[in-house]
Amino acid sequence: MTATADGPPPDVRTQGLAPPRVPADDPAESFERQRGTRWLQPSLLLQTALQAVISGVLGQYNDKREQMGDIDAQGYLDLSDADGDLWVDYVSDTGDGFDATYAVAALLSRPALELATPVGQPHPTRRGRLLVMGGDECYPAASVDEYENRLIGPYRAALPEVPDDEAPYLQAVPGNHDWYDGLTAFMRTFCQKRWIGGWRSAQARSYFATKLSAGWWLWGIDIQFDTYLDEAQLAYFKTVARELQPGDAIVLCTAKPSWVAATDDDVEAYATLDFFERTVVRPRGAAVRLALTGDRHHYSRYAARDGAQKITAGAGGAYLSPTHHLPPSILVPPPESRARSKSPSTPYEREAVYPDPADSRRLGWGILRLPLGTWTFAALLGGLYALLALAVGAALREPAHGLLDDLRAMAAALRDASLANLAGGLVNSVAGLVLCAVALGGAIAFTKHASQWRGRIVGLAHGLLHLALAVAVIRLATWLTAGVPGVWSLALVVPLVFVVGGLLAAELVAVYLLVADRFGLNSNELFAGQAIPDRRNFLRLRLQPDGTLTVYPVGLPRVPRRWRVREGAPTDGERFEAVDTPLAPVLIEPPIRIARTPQAPAPQPPAARRIPAQTVSTLDDAVPRGAPVTGSHVPPNPPGASQAPPAFPASERTTS
């Protein structure tokens, strides 16, 4: 029994797929809508840091991927029976704030989308028969409740129900945020044949393989915390690889853009992917023609001269990441890598980014709203400044007897002290020295480059500025309360330092982030501190019978902030509709055509060089600008290709 890519699938009752669904309550009322994660909230920073340390340590001694070897992988999902177009959707780094997550989920749920090209010609696209989630499905850290409220709930509300014979499949690879609970919530969500609204999960482990049509495959690997590939996972893919034919092509999904990370002072970042391709894929005469990832919450595309593509599409819901520091070209594996038997280095050129660099820089200025947007961060710094004021007062006061006399002496000492005396008071007591060490150490650690001299110097300068600002705020507070007698002066100075110092200290951090970003430091924190929900993206892939793979990069310049529940039955399509801003998706750049086999680049005179595609740059841009991305001839299947023995008995293979 066969069907077209968008028609009914074969009988799957014995193939281990998701069981029939049980009618549920209204999806719009089954979860709590969440705000976007504010990464500079002190409690969140502490919680996530502890989870990252604990999961990292436990992962070294109790790697769940090793245990997955005892789980029946159930073969691979087989979509190769399609006799027409096969559509696949890809989204990554979703499951955060409701506004952005639901907006993207709603677009993915629609049976068809018409997307504008730079010249205004619409491109019709269809909902994928398979939805792939590319990592970090839940923020800020994985848990059963967070998955329910930040991912499952919004996606169920976007596509409550479709007929079982039309339901698209769902597969996912885990990112670092999914690993923070040891992969427990991820396994329950994606690896137990469950439904998420109208999508049905189709994998048994944290990695998977899917046979597409026309000689294409889609593989998703689990790199845990950017570590090695475990033996069970390698054995699985080596078994699946027996079915590869010479000339076959693979779409490889991974949770991190290691090709870009390899240029960021980590020359070994690409070693795992290179090892996988070198030992599993190439020996079968196949090639990775398209690599997809998230982790960085923007869109970027790098292309090799033979037509291979590496695409980051990680803005499915999490805060926006900058693009203005992305390298114009990369070379992977890096020549400096010391990996044994590494592949020859291949150059890739940056072809498109979203948002464009100018827009990315402009958006960075929004960090100046930090004191009001994340008031708990300002409160943390204000508390530190208030403690510094008390430590300085205690160091400068004249000896007194009794608590009340001590407080009066502290108030008088602060009121009469000059700026120089206040600064000296910071280091004239143990408490002052400890607080100064906390301020300086925190500022150095905040640079994320504390192990490098550049990071230490920049962090030290940042910390010293905070100490200087604290002294100035203390002096201002004592001047404003100069007419208040006795201990009441101190009772007013401390709250003033807390409030004014907290606001000014948070603004100083914002200014620091803007300046540091100019030198390539703390760019991630510059954007994480804002939690920008706009500039979303996902990918729509189309495989045609002749073997042509076309990638449609979908952008959403503006995300609605206000929603209301639609009237009608709980299963009647999208349960929420935007009130303030309609969903208006666009093509980030013209569709990208990828040949199944590597293509020799045709020589071109300098004047004929292709102009890199531009991208949507502002919220008001309805249509992106840029030159068309031209394709190349896609050759037919290689003559004489023989069928490899099946990797699994037919009774064990997941088919559709």
Image (cartoon, rainbow, N blue to C red):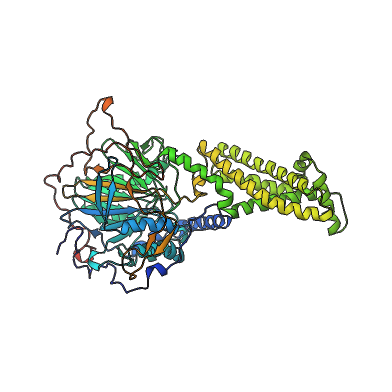
Relative placement, left or right, of 482 versus 355 is: right
Q: Quadrant of residue 508?
A: top right
Assign the N terminus to one quadrant of the image. bottom left
Q: Quadrant of residue 419?
A: top right
**Viewer can see residue 89:** yes
Decide which of 94, 424 is in the foreground and name it: 94
Above or below residue 469? Residue 109 is below
Above or below residue 313? Residue 361 is above
The residue located at (58%, 41%) in the rendering is 511
Above or below residue 18? Residue 209 is above
The residue located at (46%, 56%) in the rendering is 60
Q: Quadrant of residue 428?
A: top right
Q: In the image, residue 613 lies at what x, y percent?
A: 32, 37
Decide which of 536, 238 is in the foreground and name it: 536
Decide which of 587, 294 is in the foreground and name it: 587
Q: In the image, residue 464 lies at what x, y percent?
A: 66, 40
Relative placement, left or right, of 434 versus 60 is: right
Q: Residue furthest right?
A: 401
**Viewer can see residue 325:** no
Assign the C terminus to one quadrant of the image. bottom left
Decide which of 70, 554 is in the foreground and name it: 554
Q: Residue furthest left?
A: 640
Q: In the image, residue 516 lies at what x, y percent?
A: 54, 39
The residue located at (29%, 36%) in the rendering is 627
Disc tally is 0
Q: In the image, residue 292 lies at what x, y percent?
A: 33, 48
